[in-house]
Image: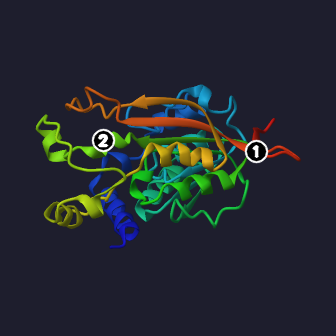
Amino acid sequence: MDVRDHNRRAWNHCVDIGNRWTVPVDSDAVARASQGSLEVLLTPIRQVPRHWFPEVLGGVDLLALASAGGQQGPLFAAAGARVTVFDASDGQLGQDRIVAEREGLELRTVRGDMADLSDLEDESFDLVFHPVSNIFVEDVRPVWREAARVLRPGGTLLAGFVNPLYFLFDDDALNRGEFVVRYALPYADSEQLPSAKLESFMALQEPLCFGHTLTDQIGGQLDAGLALIDLYEDRWGDGKALDERIATFVATRSIKLTPAPGARGFRRARR
């Protein structure tokens, strides 16, 4: 099964049916961003703290990685950043272009695989903004390596991902308020779902998910030469049983390191 191609088509379908994560921001949100009030999400509910961004976004080269849908890229552009939106879904990228045209904003859209940014030059961005989306790739480590490659020394990666514990439980049982541990990590819909449920997902054009370990989510960032400097947790906010007991999302703030001249290891770049 070509999961990447399926997920690309599935997200195009999500745009067609008005999925929550495909609905573009309105003009009021764009106006607030242009006035310095930036309201963006890495995870479902909690807004990213303003201090996680440069004090002034004007002139910042920003990559919205697997972040299309017209919800974030246009707000960064309104705040003055030079924005590139990179995503696998033509439909999602189209939402960013719609907002940009509607609001008179400049941004660039590029279609591709989040684990392969070969169309983007080394050290060409000051900030990479990567909301919860690596659940749609089988191996997350190339995503971190590519994000680190395109960041300038001292640049920032802001990322959101799913707490891997979420993938242990049977989803149908969770919807009934029951906790049934059925799966193991790392997790893949395409390999661990019962065949009937997988066939249903495919027929409904639902995106297929992967659950990555913390070793790959956080350790992968460290191995890519990024230094983790802050994080917070978040929830779905749906009031379901698991959401009431544990935060199922994590947002991280990391800085790209640079080799110290003549020394082994890494240090933080000074700006």
Left or right: residue 218 versus residue 148 is: left
Check the image and name the residue furthest to the bottom: 1
Residue 52, given in percent of the width and then of the height, sits at 60, 30
Instruction: From the image, tell me which residue sits under label 2.
Output: 166
Q: Quadrant of residue 226?
A: top right
Image quadrant in which the N terminus is located: bottom left
**Residue at image x 44%, y 36%?**
250
- Judging from the image, the colouring scheme is rainbow
Judging depth in this view, the residue of 13 and 79 nearest the camera is 13
Judging depth in this view, the residue of 71 and 105 nearest the camera is 71
Q: Amino acid at mark 1?
A: Gly
Left or right: residue 185 versus residue 63 is: left
**Residue at image x 55%, y 28%?**
37
**Residue at image x 43%, y 62%?**
89
Left or right: residue 55 versus residue 73 is: right
User: What distance separates the C-alpha of mark 1 from that of mark 2?
Assistant: 35 Å
Mark toward the viewer: 1 or 2: 1
Instruction: From the image, tell me which residue sits under label 1.
Output: 265
First in sequence, mark 1 or 2: give its number.
Answer: 2
Image quadrant in which the C terminus is located: top right
Residue 214, given in percent of the width and then of the height, sits at 45, 43
Q: Quadrant of residue 202?
A: bottom left
Judging depth in this view, the residue of 110 and 176 nearest the camera is 176
Check the image and name the residue furthest to the left: 176
Badge 2 marks a residue whose secondary structure is helix
Residue 255, given in percent of the width and then of the height, sits at 66, 39
